[in-house]
Amino acid sequence: DIRLYVGESAYVGRRDHSSAYSPFETFDGNGFETKYGFGETITLTTSAIPRGRTVFVRVAARIRYVTEGTSRYNYNAAKRVNMPQ
């Protein structure tokens, strides 16, 4: 299960993201690889983020280890994106 989170905080994640900016798309098995392949670049095209806004993007992968009854995510470091004016 892989998720892409977009928000206005550098601590963007499952509990702190903008649902208006974050595409709701999850992948099971090799679905992510099938659609996007492996690499270091993911292209997200959206008109939801206002021009001139600064947002942060993180990718999260759900791990199979359950703690306190909840499946957890591993996150990459948040990347800052400055939307053009």
Image (cartoon, rainbow, N blue to C red):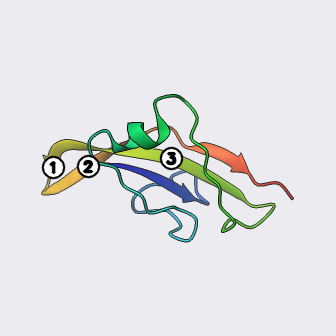
Above/below status of 40 relative to 71: above
Q: Callout 3, which amino acid?
A: Arg
Res. 58 mark: 3
Q: Which mark is residue 67?
A: 1
Disc 1 or 3, which lies upstream in sequence? 3
Q: Residue furthest front?
A: 34
81 vs 37: above or below = below
Q: Nearer the viewer, mark 1 or mark 3?
A: 3
Mark earlier in primary sequence (2, 3): 3
Which residue is depicted at the point 56% across and 49% down? 57
- Camera-nearest residue between 56 and 51: 51
Quick one: SS at disc 2? strand
Mark 2–mark 1 CB contact (< 8 Å): yes
Which SS class for mark 3? Answer: strand
Instruction: Give the Cα distance between marks 1 and 3.
Output: 22 Å
Label 1 Cα neighbours within 10 Å, binned few <14 / some 14-19 / many ≥20:
few
Query: In the image, which is nearer the foreground, mark 2 or mark 1?
Result: 2
Q: Amino acid at mark 1?
A: Thr
- Which residue type carries mark 2? Arg
Q: Residue at x 40, y 39 (%)?
A: 34
Q: Which residue is mark 2?
A: 72
On screen, residue 19 versus residue 71, left or right, reads right
- Mark 2 or mark 1: which comes first in sequence? 1
What residue is drawn where x is 74% and y is 67%? Answer: 50
In x, y percent, where is residue 68? 14, 55
Q: Secondary structure at mark 1?
A: strand
Q: CA distance from mark 2 to mark 3?
A: 15 Å
